[in-house]
Image (tube, rainbow, N blue to C red):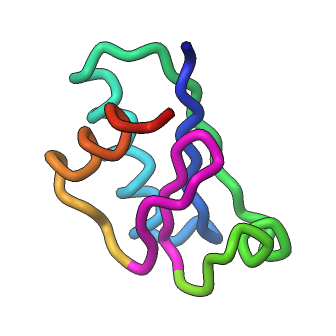
Amino acid sequence: MKKKIQVLGMGCPKCNKLYAAAEAAAKELGVDYEMEKINDINKITDMGVMMTPALAVNGVVKCSARIPSSEELKKFIAEAK
């Protein structure tokens, strides 16, 4: 099953760093994935995120307001349903 990895943010350097880190983690895991950037503030707040950058996997927000470690990212992606 393809995992949908979403990075929520307005395109700041931290958001871009999170996008690159999440993509690298997915590649290291060897999972089938799709990356998406969400920069629409209404969509971001609709997902319950008040501080960016944030990461969602398969529509579930896993973290916000920080860039998780590589190990955390792998765990978020691997455990996503």
Task: Tell me, yes or no, whether the highlighted magenta stretch contains residue 56.
Answer: yes
Residue 25 location in percent, x, y? 27, 35
Q: Is residue 1 above or below residue 54?
A: above
Residue 68 location in percent, x, y? 26, 62
Q: Quadrant of residue 20?
A: top left
Horizontal relation, residue 40 to residue 21: left or right: right
Q: Is residue 75 above or below residue 26?
A: below
Task: Tell me, yes or no, whether the highlighted magenta stretch contains residue 3.
Answer: no
Q: Nearer the viewer, residue 51 or 12?
A: 51
Q: Residue at x 60, y 62 (%)?
A: 8
Horizontal relation, residue 29 to residue 34: left or right: left
From this viewpoint, which residue is outermost toward the right?
42
Main SS of residues in magenta? strand
Instruction: Give the total number of marks visible in the rendering.
Output: 0
Q: Residue at x 42, y 80 (%)?
A: 65
Q: Nearer the viewer, residue 75 or 39?
A: 75
Horizontal relation, residue 30 to residue 70: left or right: right
Q: Residue at x 50, y 33 (%)?
A: 81
- Report the span colored magenta: 52-65
From this viewpoint, which residue is outermost toward the bottom?
50
